[in-house]
Image (spheres, rainbow, N blue to C red):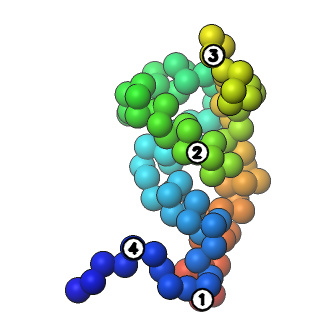
Amino acid sequence: MPRITQPQDDAWSSDVEAAVATFGNRARNEILRYLSAHGPATRGDIVASVSAGEPSVAKHLLALEEAGAIIVDVEAGRRHGRSPRYSANAPRIKKLLEAHLQYLLEG
């Protein structure tokens, strides 16, 4: 059976793609859940509280930021030597979930 690498469907939007990438990963869900309950938090706070190591958390934070699911209080180019704080972006999370639900249920 051929593997689907990219759905051939106009309903598969960039928000659906971001939702699948964001919510289809347990570590990212754990980070979002932690930030929703305890944020804003530093990367060190997050590492100490979730079941993933520092390199993994750093990678997931970048992906979550790119998807808009988290907000960072320091601009990307100005973080060297600083300890940015991360917060869950509830409106964006809801938008991604709604896009995914619409794709699944109304397609």
Indicate the quadrant containing the N terminus: top left, top right, bottom left or bottom right.
bottom left
Q: Is residue 36 above or below residue 26?
A: above
Amino acid type of the residue tagged 1 in the rendering: Gly
Q: Quick one: SS at disc 4?
A: loop
Nearer the camera: disc 1 or disc 3: 3
Number of the label disc, if any, that sits on residue 64: 2
Query: Badge 1: how crowded within 10 Å, few (<14), some, or many (20+)?
Result: few
Marks 1,4: beta carbons within 8 A: no
Judge left or right: residue 41 versus residue 7: right
Determine which quarter of the picture holds residue 51. top left
Query: Between residues 101 and 18, which one lies in front from this camera angle?
Result: 18
Indicate the quadrant containing the C terminus: top left, top right, bottom left or bottom right.
bottom right
Amino acid type of the residue tagged 2 in the rendering: Leu
Please name the residue that numbered disc 1 is placed on: 107
Instruction: Quote the CA–CA distance across marks 1 and 4.
Output: 19 Å
Please name the residue that numbered disc 3 is placed on: 80
Instruction: Quote the CA–CA distance across marks 1 and 2.
Output: 26 Å
Instruction: Quote the CA–CA distance across marks 2 and 4.
Output: 22 Å
Amino acid type of the residue tagged 3 in the rendering: His
Nearer the camera: disc 2 or disc 3: 3
Amino acid type of the residue tagged 4 in the rendering: Thr
Marks 1,2: beta carbons within 8 A: no
Query: Between residues 92 and 13, which one lies in front from this camera angle?
Result: 13
First in sequence: mark 1 or mark 2? 2
Marks 3,4: beta carbons within 8 A: no
